[in-house]
């Protein structure tokens, strides 16, 4: 079982497998920096799509050896994004990654019906593996970045992606906490009704390979002491692997709080696509960016 | 300026003022424990309403000297809660505090139109002062506990309460961050529209004595480095005093994350009532409970 991001990256490094990453509009120092370590360590090959001369000069400026990269010429950000997606779709690459192109343009290419990476009716969502010193293992958190207010079907899909990722980390039957403000089911919080439905679905095996409970608050999910004090009977027992949040406005400040105030690092990626999609915030740490690339290589090694 | 909870309690202790706290159904060790330090330190007088004999024996069991408390006999939890509220309303007490009575019953007494503490049309909300080692000052956070999905008027009231509390800590013009998943105004996130309206109200002086901006994500609110990296022009500059959240489902896991994973302690109370109302979660630490009592005494020393 992988319990840290360092260990996750080590697993990828030592696998002997090299994944091809197609990067759309790759000429910024940020993108080059985050890929250089992965490429140098030998588990990724970077197909850098953009203005070749600019990419090479940025490599030199940032101290990255341009010989380590493969450069592919593109005229503008839109065509670079489309080319990166298309190469991944065709199998020339295993992973697609956003460069300096705007998130909206990049995701439009990913979601394109004809040439994109999103199967029909598939739900696209974001899962993060978060490491914090104060918890004894990784926390898989969703959705930090994509779906504003997930409905029931979207929540079910989100749970599935997080379970799948946790399993790739060796957690056979992860504990999934459906996070609310308390453990009470209440009409004031419609999400608690979705959560009740999901628990029944898990009981029926319609959401498989997990221990699921919710609504629970964060203390019941992650603190065995609180479970004792409150006397709530929950199979999570303060030992959750996965935290599913009711909204993006709920999940996003939570994970950012862990990054900023609890010494957190993360690895995250878009799920629901036919191939891993790497999309990072510029304000993530260099280490988190490296971990995102490593995670996408780990997840690429299975058919999604 | 008060920058820590220890300093806040010290300010209350050294004020020479003693506040009377009426406690509804006070016979549990939890309530007695959290009041005993405040009473021993001389800044609070506890009017313990409940079954006298039971309260005394619980004092003895928990090592608290019963001589320090005033006991008032009550038959059941409902009448104990009503008596505590009524004594506070009449001025016999300065603060009301929940004991072993259920939260719903207790709040019903507080909100009672005839005999309660909530002025007509007043918005009741919860503000926490949170101390974490990783931030250089206190963070005032709202609403962790009361309003599920605040509308615009409720958000304006919440901001007012948090500003008022911050000012009692000596922060003349607190920086208020209206927290979202990003800094973008978007129809996908109706709260960002409310936030835009609030910023205009602050500009017009309709929300006074603060620097307000939103939507912002947590990084823009609390991390100067991220402000630089993202190049967003915000007067908050990563130095927010107050974080206003779009929903209870958003605020609650955030503050619990800080408690559990970032070494946080808190002091919180209900605002919007004519007198301070203390309502604590059983899973708060002993220290946080003591700080809640101290905070209510600090806030009682002004006309609300």
Image (cartoon, coloured by chain):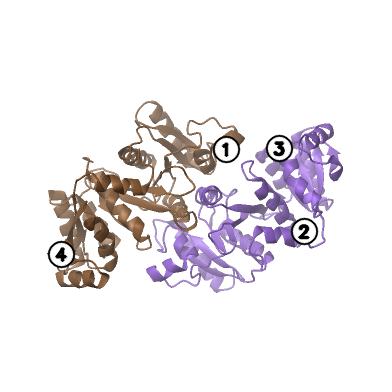
Chain colours: A purple, B brown
Callout 2: 10 Å neighbours few (<14), some, many (20+)?
Answer: some
Q: Looking at the image, is A157 positioned above or below residue B165?
A: below
Q: Which residue is labeled 1 in the image?
A: B225
Callout 1: 10 Å neighbours few (<14), some, many (20+)?
Answer: some
| Disc 3 element | loop
Task: Residue at the far top: name it.
Answer: B204
Residue lying at 16% horizontally and 69% vertically, measured from the top left: B51
- Tell whether B160 sits left or right of A75: left
Q: Which mark is residue A101?
A: 3
Residues flagged by tags 3 and 2 on a common chain: yes
* Chain of the residue that carries numbered disc 4 in the rendered image: B
Q: Which mark is residue B56?
A: none
Q: Is residue B194 visible?
A: no
Q: Looking at the image, is B208 positioned above or below residue A64?
A: above
Q: How many marks?
A: 4
| Disc 2 element | helix
Q: Position of residue A167 (x, y in %)?
A: 66, 66
* Chain of the residue that carries numbered disc 3 in the rendered image: A
Q: Nearer the viewer, residue B53 or A277?
A: B53
Q: Which residue is labeled 4 in the image?
A: B67
Q: Position of residue A150 (x, y in %)?
A: 54, 53
Q: Nearer the viewer, residue A249 or A286?
A: A286
Q: CA distance from mark 1 to mark 4?
A: 54 Å
User: Which mark sits nearer the N-terminus, 3 or 2?
Assistant: 2
Contact? badges 2 and 4 (CB < 8 Å): no
Q: Which residue is labeled 2 in the image?
A: A13
Q: CA distance from mark 3 to mark 4?
A: 71 Å
Residues flagged by tags 1 and 2 on a common chain: no
């Amino acid at each position: 079982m992988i319990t840290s991001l360092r260990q996750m990256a080590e697993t990828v490094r030592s696998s002997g497998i090299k994944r091809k990453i197609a990067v759309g509009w790759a000429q910024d120092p940020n993108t080059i920096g985050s890929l250089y370590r992965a490429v140098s360590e030998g588990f990724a090959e970077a197909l850098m799509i953009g203005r070749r001369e600019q990419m090479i000069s940025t490599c030199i400026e940032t101290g990255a050896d341009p010989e380590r990269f493969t450069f592919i010429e593109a005229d503008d950000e839109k065509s670079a994004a489309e080319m990166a997606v298309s190469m991944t779709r065709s199998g020339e690459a295993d992973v697609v990654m956003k460069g300096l192109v705007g998130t909206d343009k990049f995701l439009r290419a990913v979601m394109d019906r004809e040439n994109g990476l999103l199967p029909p009716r598939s739900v696209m969502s974001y899962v993060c593996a978060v490491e914090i010193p104060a918890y004894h293992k990784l926390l898989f958190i969703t959705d930090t970045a994509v779906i504003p207010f997930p409905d029931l079907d979207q929540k079910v899909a989100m749970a599935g992606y997080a379970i799948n990722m946790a399993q790739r980390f060796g957690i056979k039957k992860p504990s999934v906490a459906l996070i609310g403000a308390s453990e009470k089911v209440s009409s004031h919080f419609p999400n608690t009704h979705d959560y009740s439905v999901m628990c029944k679905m898990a009981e029926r095996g319609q959401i498989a390979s997990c221990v699921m409970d919710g609504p629970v608050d964060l203390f019941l999910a992650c603190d065995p002491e609180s479970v004792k004090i409150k006397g709530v009977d929950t199979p999570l027992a303060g030992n959750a692997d996965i935290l599913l949040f009711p909204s993006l406005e709920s999940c996003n400040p939570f994970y950012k709080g862990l990054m900023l105030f609890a010494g957190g690092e993360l690895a995250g990626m878009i799920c629901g696509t036919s191939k891993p999609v790497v999309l990072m915030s510029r304000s993530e740490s260099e280490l988190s960016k490296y971990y995102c690339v490593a995670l996408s290589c780990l997840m690429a090694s299975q058919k999604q």
